[in-house]
Amino acid sequence: MKINESQIKQVNAEIEQLIKADSFYGQRLKEHGISGIETVEDFEKLPFSEKKDLRDAYPLGLMTAPEEKIVRIHSSSGTTGLPVIIPYTQKDVDVWAEMFKRCYEMAGITNLDRIHITPGYGLWTAGIGFQAGAEKLGAMVIPMGPGNTDKQLQMMSDLGSTVLCATSSYALLLAEEIEKRGIKDKIKLKKGVIGSERWGEKMRNRITNELGIEIYDIYGLTEIYGPGIGISCKYDCGMHYWDDYIYIEIIDPVTLKPVPDGEMGEVVITTLCKEGAPLIRYRTHDLSKIIPGECECKSKFPRLGTIMGRTDDMMKIKGVNVFPSQIEEVLAMFHEISSEYQIRISHLDGKDTMRIYVETTGDVDFIDLSKRIAEKVKSKIGFTPLVKVVEMGVLPRSEKKSKRVFDERYE
């Protein structure tokens, strides 16, 4: 999808703000002699922005609006360096809530629903985004935040929560606990709005079946408002995103040139009306594609495919480029194992080793299963991993995002 005239006008307004504020991107535009754009070709010549740029601007170098207009800040986790601080004006907060309201509506959620929110609050964008959208919708909010599973299940049961907002990891943990405690008849959940981490078909099916709910993928990132910039509809064929507020292009991560609709590449996002910290051509490193054509739901909003991983997820093992999604595809072929897995990479005796841990029930032959999985993985990636089969529930569950890949070569 090419940028249209209306979006070009919005980008020019963002460019004007950035130059006026003399932010890192405003300075970059000045260096390139750019004060605005007129065509698609002009837009595609605009320089990219990256997470490093945002970290270099720490703490408030991204602030584009005057300080008296800034009402809130949010931040990335900063687990791999300085956190990214994103300032928001009241308009930014309102726009984000409106986008999130649309997400709920796309999922068929109404003001008669009771929305149970488990993602974290505070500097992280998740919890408060889910809440603001639900309040704008007029629904009852149950703002639990993460953790304390006993309390979560009590409130879910006593208050009759109908919508669960969670990471896929925590939704699975709750599903397993509900099953274990035999309280499924007390749970009134109908729908789940699930986000913040990539998850495979096997996990999706387990959550759907064990909780007995419809689930919807939600998309977003702290740098671009937060979750709520896109969501799947009931036809579950990609995520509709709000192209009156953001423009998405897909580029080849090597050549940095836009790729045709339907082709996989890196998601690049431009904000169209952000005041606190506008971003132009921000490289997310998420891998996806634009889905061409009209959706069965008849929405006018375009669609982004499922996030398949990240360009920086790639692991080089024994000279082979491996993505976690490739391992997931193989594991999905084995009905005997759960959706949980771990990959551990280490360097022993001068060579790289990959170990894959999977879970199964006690009624299968662990040795035979590990051998069959190892053979399938070898046919996919070209070398044989060590596969360790463990009992159901042995691998850790998470209340936030699950870490499934551990590269111990650099620890």
Image (spheres, rainbow, N blue to C red):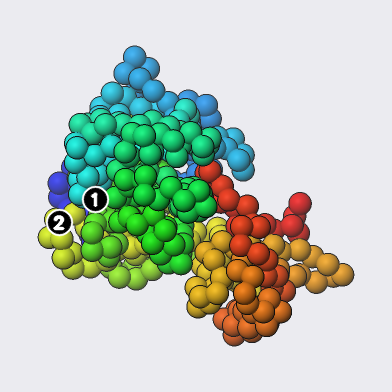
Three-letter residue code for mark 2: Ser
Q: Nearer the viewer, mark 2 or mark 1?
A: 1
Q: Position of residue 296 (x, y in %)?
A: 16, 65
Q: Position of residue 36 (x, y in %)?
A: 26, 42
Please give the name of the residue rendered at 29% of the width and 43% of the height, measured from the top-left corner. Answer: 162
Mark 1 belongs to which amino acid?
A: Ala
- Residue picked out by circle 2: 299
Q: Earlier in the sequence, mark 2 or mark 1?
A: 1
- Disc 1 element: loop
Which residue sits at x=71%, y=64%?
345
Q: Position of residue 110 (x, y in %)?
A: 19, 41
Quadrant location of the N terminus in the rendered image: bottom left
Location of residue 100 by image quarter: top left
Residue 397 visible, this angle: yes
Instruction: Check disc 1 and report the residue beneath it.
Output: 107
Residue 165 sits above or below residue 307 on the image: above
Q: Is residue 16 visible?
A: no
* Image side of residue 230 versus residue 28, left or right: left
